[in-house]
Image (spheres, rainbow, N blue to C red):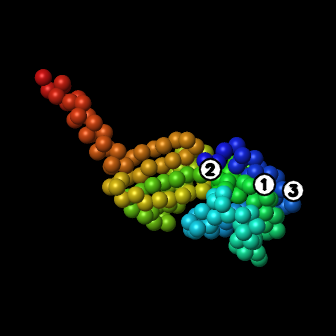
Amino acid sequence: MVNPRLAGRYAKSLIDIAVEKNVLEAIKADVAFLLSAINSSPELKGLLRSPIIKADKKTGVMDAICKGRVNAITEVFCRLLISKSRENALPEILGAFNEQYNVLKGIQQVKITTAQPLSEEVKASLLSKLKADTGFDKVELKTSVKEELIGGFILEYNNNLVDASIQRDLRDIKRQFQNNDYVFNIR
């Protein structure tokens, strides 16, 4: 497990350099690219986490992935992580970068989980309602589908959880019957 403070410090360094060099948006795009590459390739994730594979091999693989696709700052940053034996923390550092970027830009992350995929019209309606109710200016909406919810939704933002799913309602009803809440009131 990677220390979150370590990931946060490296991410802050990358953001500071990107702001100083006026390439923050380019680095943000690089971070998205690298996260996508790592998350879509278990082999790459394994390579980064492996203590057996030598640093020069890891540098060669990362150079091949980054060459011509990312900013020079991002390339140097990846090489720095490998030279410091911190490449195993790259996914966490990239995640921390995204969190710090959102704080810097005032973007609120909102995750909604539904039983069925949301249409663009429903997403737009949900965003406008959320902005009106919470006062958020910028919202980044992430959607996911979990069929076991049956219906309704689960909304997560700023450490808040709104569970308006049918699955939760059924769990609540089951618990009430197991506790015999209604038997007591009948007598």
The residue at the far top in this view is 187
Along the line of sight, the residue nearer the viewer: 119 or 29: 29
Residue 69 at least partly seen: no
For marks 1 and 3 on the same chain, the one whose residue lies earlier in the sequence: 3
Q: What residue is drawn where x is 43% and y is 64%?
A: 117
Amino acid carrying mark 2 in the image = Gln
Residue that mark 1 sits on: 84
- Left or right side of 131 for 9: right
Along the line of sight, the residue nearer the viewer: 121 or 116: 116
Question: What secondary structure is found at the residue carrying circle 1?
Answer: loop
When the figure is inspected, residue 139 is found, relative to residue 64, above or below; the finding is above
For marks 2 and 1 on the same chain, the one whose residue lies earlier in the sequence: 1
The residue at the far left in this view is 187
What is the x, y in percent for residue 8?
A: 71, 47
Q: Nearer the viewer, mark 2 or mark 3?
A: 3
Residue 166 at least partly seen: yes
Task: Quarter of the image for the C terminus: give it.
Answer: top left
The disc at residue 108 is 2
Q: What residue is drawn where x is 79% and y is 58%?
A: 83
